[in-house]
Image (cartoon, coloured by chain):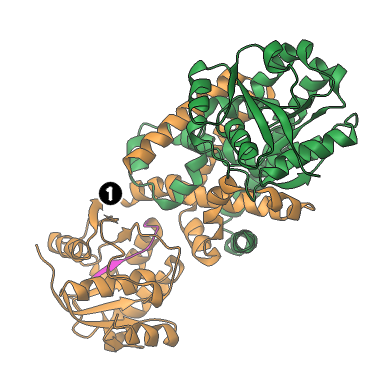
Chain colours: A green, B orange
Amino acid sequence: MTAHFNRVVVAGVGLIGGSFAAALKQAGAARHVVGMGRSTGSLQQAQSLGLIDEIATDWSVALKGADLVLLAMPVGQMGAAMQAMAPHLEPQTLVTDGGSTKGDVIEAIYTHLSGHLACVVPAHPIAGAEKSGPSAATPDLYRGRKVVLTPLPENAPHAIDTVRAAWAVCGAVMHQMSPQEHDRVFAAVSHLPHLLAFGLVHDLAGRANAEQLFRYAASGFRDFTRIAGSHPEMWRDICVANRQPLLAELDAYLAELAWLRALLLNADGDGLEKLFAEASAARNAWGAAQ
Amino acid sequence: MTAHFNRVVVAGVGLIGGSFAAALKQAGAARHVVGMGRSTGSLQQAQSLGLIDEIATDWSVALKGADLVLLAMPVGQMGAAMQAMAPHLEPQTLVTDGGSTKGDVIEAIYTHLSGHLACVVPAHPIAGAEKSGPSAATPDLYRGRKVVLTPLPENAPHAIDTVRAAWAVCGAVMHQMSPQEHDRVFAAVSHLPHLLAFGLVHDLAGRANAEQLFRYAASGFRDFTRIAGSHPEMWRDICVANRQPLLAELDAYLAELAWLRALLLNADGDGLEKLFAEASAARNAWGAAQ
């Protein structure tokens, strides 16, 4: 299936939304892109960069005759956006999103878009977020990156196929999981590491000798804590939204640390070396395969 | 003070020892460098690379007329090396080391080199260890990097000055701390992050769905876990040697995680955002100053 859309609405024109718009336009898959957003400045910037063709401030205007909507705001704002768009959503319009968590987005879909469940196909693009805003958007952001679809049981097969084709035309490698599986996997490999890095930096930054500690921090610390420089509001939303799977992962990790603590307390060099060797082998095998 | 040595002995001719030898030679500060070590292969490689002038397999030969000795083996082997060298150490010979922990090295000094305390000046070069072996050695390794001296109360002022000058001639920026302070600082900013990264990878690698988890791990995970690919034996030695300060740091971190857990459990978005914002500001200020 190839994707072609006459009218695409991108709500949130930052890195995720702006790049989706740019990629569809570059591929010739979107004739006209409408940008919606909270910030007039971002919308004007997105228009002047050619990411979008039209600025809309009202869902009733934006959604008229739309083929596809991407919700690309922080996950904490998606419920309100869905509530606002619901009265104006036409039956043929497909909706997808770019949220990093899926359980909470899907809860909002059932709450606010219950009349449109056939057409709303949740998605999570695994694309870096070190930079943000329209100026960071690029048509190549999704090229070779994974996008995970987590379809609803109520989704029409044609809606799933078309949303999948839209992301694929941006260059993404398409994956599919249940929302529960998605949220557990990303709690483990993304949300927990962010929580742990924020926690370490917060712990050290509050010490009386914080300045001395940071003076002697070197390259290992730099890489380990890079994600602690991430956007606080975005990560607040993700952690709150995905708190159940994240708590389960945190508890599993606390059990691991309890074991490490016992090995240290007993000066169990053999036990530590075995654990480090298993971790090192797994990490280096993964790194070599990337 | 400028440093000049007729005869330097480097015990362990890998990244740390080989680079020290190469830097002293390049600066014209060492006339003749003798290499000692466990591995004949490494010693021959170091000689063919021009890092050392002579291979010694016997401390009685190596130490004859030596001005300066660098102990650059893993910290777990330093006690045995000191015991073996003690009978042959001449009164004028200065000794320093490149160990990442200082409390245990100093304990070994008091045990095995008690007759030479004026001349043995412990040091810790903060230089990356992603590569290892003689082929990774370079005269520029220490240029602009910190080297922390942790002198003993018994050290002669002249010994401290000369050892400091030797590291400085390699291009290092010299710092000084008490051994206790050193071990606490590096437990916090280096040893704990390594332990946490090893623990996370070990936890995930042991899961039934480990393959799936690693498949969706992205750039944040890559940086966070880079140090989990470190050398298991080296980190076993460091963790065992520095286990008391490391346990104290681990317990402080566990208290931080208990707080984070409570915030998650209560879905306390404001509390999480405040903590993340403090961490993010501290991390980005530190990163910008590097």
Is B118 colored magenta in this rendering? no
Identify the main secondary structure in magenta: loop
Q: Position of residue B183 (x, y in %)?
A: 39, 50
The residue stretch that appears in magenta: B95-102
Question: Is A106 placed above or below B176 here?
Answer: above
Q: Quadrant of the N terminus of chain A?
A: top right
Work out whether A77 lies above or below B137: above
Looking at the figure, which quarter contains the C terminus of chain A? Answer: bottom right
Residue receiving disc 1 = B177
Crowding around mark 1 (Cα neighbors within 10 Å: few <14, some 14 to 19, many 20+) is: some
Q: Position of residue B240 (x, y in %)?
A: 51, 58
Residue A270 lies, with reference to residue A236, above or below; the image says below
Which residue is painted at 28% across and 82% down in the image? B52
The percent position of residue B43, horizontal first and vertical second, equals 38, 84
Figure disc tally: 1
A71 relative position to B157: left or right: right
Q: Position of residue B80 (x, y in %)?
A: 42, 74
Give the side of residue A282 with respect to residue B7, left or right.
right
Most foreground residue, A46 or A208: A46
Of A272 and A24, which appears nearest the observer?
Answer: A24
* Residue B267 visible in the snapshot: no
For the point 58% across and 32% down, which residue is it?
Answer: A18
